Amino acid sequence: MHQETELLVKAIDGLRQDPNYFKDYIFPIASAFFTSILGAAIAYFTLKHQEKIQIEKEKMDTANKWTLLMEEARAALISIKGNYYKDLSDHPLKRVATIPSILFHASPVEESFEKLSFIIPKAEDRKKDYPKWSQISRIRSMVNNYNYLLQLWQQRNQIERPIKEQLMAKFPHQSYVDISYEEAVAAIGPANMSVLVDLTERVIKLTDDIIIELDNFLCEFPKYAKTRIDTKRLKQYGSVLIYSNNGNELLIEILKRTPAPNLKEVEALFGEPADEIEKRLVTGYE
């Protein structure tokens, strides 16, 4: 019996394995560690991917917002110019008579520019020619001039209405456009007439310039902005708004510049030669 017990103990001892420290201790710890690292890496790259998508979304939203804002601004100026663009002669006084007080509800563009920073070329691209609409300063200048132009139109309305009322009272049986230059100056005075002529020529010129600038922005900015956006990441989100005149004949006609004024007709009124008067009408868009 004692011998059988001894044999049983030996058999049990034979089944016992030598301790394996790697399998028993190191492997479980390493497995848990690398699982944690893998999970953290997956979470990190998923977050970075989502952040990149969000950045591209913001770029697209900003580009589309500016396209819509400038389309609205251009539409406002087209509506204003539509009141007179067909009937302008080159005589400054007749141009004053042709353009009435124009009521409009356009609001200044009050939009921040910092979100447009994505359109600035990267350092490696700066040796190349700058695209026109990669310059935020150019966009800011256009917006500021548009807002200034709205103020000029409002100012002209305030000046023009009482002057025309004064002329109508003075010449009740004559159409405004039939009043001669000499009669008009005698009725309201050369100072009032020179202010109205000067302001009229300024709004005519700047309206042409800003409409053309806005139209160029609408045609070219979306194309350029699209090159600065990773649109492949946004296939399920949307697209960059692309603008085209689509052969709109009325629009193309309004985009043409109005006839230049014959400033020699008002040299006596301003007391200076026509070329000096013309210099004051320069806007920088020539």
Image (spheres, rainbow, N blue to C red):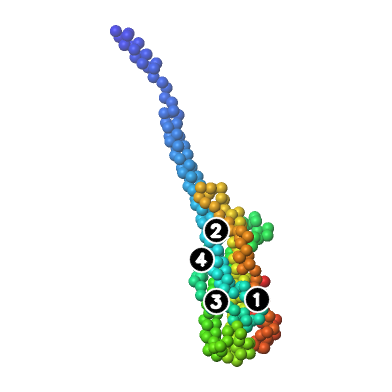
Q: Check the image and report above or below for 275 versus 127.
A: below
Q: Which mark is residue 111?
A: 4
Is 50 in front, or is 284? 284
Residue 244: quarter of image: bottom right
Give the residue type at disc 4. Answer: Glu
Q: Residue at x 62, y 71 (%)?
A: 208
Q: Position of residue 127 (x, y in %)?
A: 68, 58
Nearest-to-viewer mark from 1 and 3: 3
Give the residue type at disc 2. Answer: Ala
Tag 1–tag 2 contact (CB < 8 Å): no
Nearest-to-viewer mark from 1 and 4: 1
Q: Which mark is residue 63?
A: 2
For label 3, the residue is: 153
Of marks 1 and 3, which one's residue comes earlier in the chain?
Answer: 3
Of marks 1 and 2, which one's residue comes earlier in the chain?
Answer: 2
Q: CA distance from mark 1 to mark 3?
A: 17 Å
Of marks 4 and 2, which one's residue comes earlier in the chain?
Answer: 2
Q: Which mark is residue 44?
A: none
Q: Check the image and report above or below for 129 versus 277.
A: above
Q: Position of residue 252 (x, y in %)?
A: 63, 65
Does the image show residue 51?
A: yes
Q: Position of residue 216 (x, y in %)?
A: 62, 63
Circle 2 Cα neighbour tier, 10 Å, few/some/many (<14 / 14–19 / ≥20): many
Q: Position of residue 260 (x, y in %)?
A: 67, 76
Is 286 in front, or is 33? 286
Q: CA distance from mark 1 to mark 4?
A: 27 Å
Does the image show residue 66?
A: no
